[in-house]
Image (cartoon, rainbow, N blue to C red):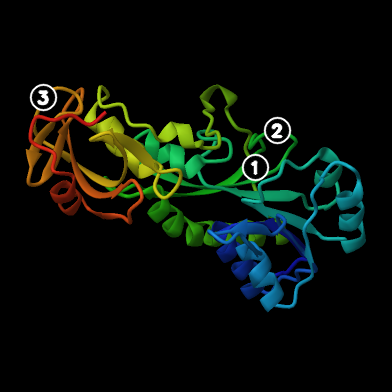
């Protein structure tokens, strides 16, 4: 297989298998660009992103710019002279001056079947919206938000109870496999490209904490998908006995009642606007996560009481 000189841009765990695969395939990586180190945990320990950690282990120079439009990064890329730029969950919009540098183009690996779910949180929104199938797309980047020409895709089903976090773990190696065959086609000159149908585009904006509030007047299916899609972050919550309660895991159940009503205690089951939801794993205010049955014993709520 022909190899290329590739500059990699990526930040979180999802991007790590892609960088690993580029290196395993024998491509030259003169530099990695990633987000600045960030404070993590209760003690706010300054921690490098996963992509930086891998790059340092492999002895690859790391750049962590805070600005992309002042010409500095474009100048650095010209010095590095890559054949191709690969971007995987980098977290920054690249200006045209950067996109114009590599002669073989800028390639992005995106966690959805474009043009659906353009934006920062495609995996989460695929789950929140109850999709049964998703996938990974490779594309040539342009100045828009995930609007470039599609090169190739890999599809995968979404499990009925699969969380966004679990789907991230499964899709990361699919992205690496897709990237490998995409780069192979670019290197040997057989790459194909197809414009996206903008009329079919949907958006997947970044999640916010406020989106985690549960409204039990909605259907059980909608709430179950919301809980799955916002696990592990930002998580979903409601009020129980006057205190906040996070819901980490749920299942669809039979039953009916007033929205939010506890219609069964064993297992813990809550009525919704349509259908019911069985609570599996919860986290009471100020306490660690636990089985819903253990929480209920401590909360001393009775059948017929309501979650809000």
Residue 238 in view (yes/no): yes
Marked residue nearer the N-terminal end (2 or 1): 2
- Mark 1 sits on what residue? 193
Mark 1: secondary structure:
loop
Please rate how many residues cluster around mark 3, counting C-alpha atoms within 10 Å: few if below 14, some from 14 to 19, many from 20. Answer: some
Tell me if mark 1 has few (under 14), some (14-19) or many (20+) residues whose alpha carbon lies within 10 angstroms of its own. few
Disc 2/disc 3 C-alpha distance (Å): 47 Å
- CA separation in Å, label 1 and label 3: 52 Å
The answer to whether 56 appears left or right of 295 in the picture is right
Task: Examine the rendered structure and indicate whether residue 96 appears above or below residue 22.
Answer: above
Residue 184: x %, y % from top left: 65, 62
Residue located beneath label 3 in the image: 257
| Residue under the image location 68 percent in, 66 percent down | 52
Taking the image as shown, residue 304 lies to the left or right of residue 243, namely: left
Q: Quadrant of the N terminus?
A: bottom right
Q: Nearer the viewer, residue 124 or 134?
A: 124
Quarter of the figure with residue 31? bottom right
Q: Nearer the viewer, residue 300 or 139?
A: 300
- The nearer-to-camera label among 2 and 1 is 2
Percent coordinates x, y for residue 268 in the rendering? 13, 43
Q: How many marks?
A: 3
> Which callout, 2 or 3, points to the residue nearer the camera?
3
Residue 259 location, x and y as percent? 19, 24
According to the picture, the residue beneath numbered tag 2 turns out to be: 144
Which residue sits at x=39%, y=50%? 156
Q: Quadrant of residue 303?
A: top left
Precedes in sequence: disc 1 or disc 3: 1
Residue located 60% across and 68% down the image: 21
Image quadrant containing the C terminus:
top left
SS of the residue under disc 3? loop
């Amino acid at each position: 297989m022909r190899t290329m000189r590739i500059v990699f841009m990526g930040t979180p765990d999802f991007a790590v298998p892609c960088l690993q695969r580029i290196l395993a395939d024998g491509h030259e990586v003169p530099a990695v660009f990633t987000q600045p180190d960030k404070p993590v945990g209760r003690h706010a320990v300054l921690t490098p992103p996963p992509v930086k950690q891998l790059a340092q282990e492999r002895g690859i120079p790391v750049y962590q710019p805070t600005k992309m439009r002042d010409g500095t990064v474009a100048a650095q890329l010209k010095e590095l002279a890559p054949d191709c730029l690969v971007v995987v969950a980098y977290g920054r919009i690249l200006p045209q001056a950067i996109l114009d540098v590599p002669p073989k183009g800028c390639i992005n690996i995106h966690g959805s079947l474009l043009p659906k779910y353009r934006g920062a949180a495609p995996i989460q929104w695929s789950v929140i919206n109850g999709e049964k199938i998703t996938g990974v797309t490779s594309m040539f980047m342009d100045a828009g938000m995930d609007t470039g020409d599609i090169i190739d895709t890999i599809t995968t089903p979404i499990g009925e109870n699969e969380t966004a976090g679990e789907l991230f773990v499964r899709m990361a190696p699919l992205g690496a496999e897709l990237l490998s065959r995409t780069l192979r086609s670019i290197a040997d000159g057989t790459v194909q490209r197809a414009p996206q149908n903008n009329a079919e585009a949907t958006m997947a904006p970044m999640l916010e904490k406020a989106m985690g509030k549960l409204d039990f007047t909605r259907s059980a299916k909608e709430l179950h998908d919301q809980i799955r899609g916002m696990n592990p972050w930002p998580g979903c919550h409601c009020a129980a006995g006057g205190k906040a309660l996070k819901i980490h895991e749920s299942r669809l159940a039979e039953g009916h009642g007033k929205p939010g009503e506890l219609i069964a205690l064993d297992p813990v089951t809550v009525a919704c606007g349509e259908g019911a939801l069985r609570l599996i794993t919860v986290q009471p205010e100020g306490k660690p996560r636990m089985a819903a049955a253990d929480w209920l014993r401590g909360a001393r709520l009775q059948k017929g009481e309501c979650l809000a």
